[in-house]
Amino acid sequence: MDRLAWFISELLEIYTIIVFANAILSWFVSGTQNSVVRQLYWWTSRLVDPVLSPIRNALGPMTRSLGIDISPFVLILLLQFLARILR
């Protein structure tokens, strides 16, 4: 069971990197014609958006007036918390 917990915690760490990359890419994708950036954003969005959508829906009323999407930050905190519990 210890190896399974380690493996899942490593997957959570990798997913955290993907969420972080998606958040960074979201800042650049609308202002660039670079196809590599657009493709990376598209692929990371396909992996991240299904998990971020419920968080965005829950945070929507509270963060709508801020003009910034903090759902990736919340997700990263949750992923890090779960990874630490598994270790």
Image (cartoon, rainbow, N blue to C red):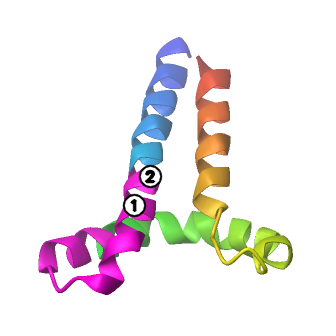
Describe the element under mark 1 as helix, strand or loop. Answer: helix
Camera-side mark, 1 or 2: 1
Q: CA distance from mark 1 to mark 2?
A: 6 Å
The quadrant in which the C terminus is found is top right
Residue 62 shows which numbered tag? none
Q: Is residue 47 above or below residue 31?
A: above
Q: Is residue 84 above or below residue 50?
A: above
Nearer to me, 18 or 27: 27
* Residue extent of the magenta highlight: 18-41
Nearer to me, 26 or 41: 26
Q: Is residue 41 above or below residue 78?
A: below
The reply, left or right, for residue 8 in relation to residue 56 is left
Q: Is residue 20 magenta?
A: yes
The reply, left or right, for residue 28 in relation to residue 36 is right
Q: Are marks 1 and 2 in contact (CB under 8 Å)?
A: yes
Mainly helix, strand or loop, the magenta region? helix
* Residue 43 place in picture, x, y as percent: 31, 70
The amino acid type found where label 2 is placed reads Phe
* Residue 78 place in picture, x, y as percent: 67, 43
**Going 50% across and 24% down the picture, which residue do you hit?**
4
The quadrant in which the N terminus is found is top right
Residue under label 2: 20
Residue under label 1: 24
Q: Pointer 2: residues within 10 angstroms few (<14), some, or many (20+)?
A: some
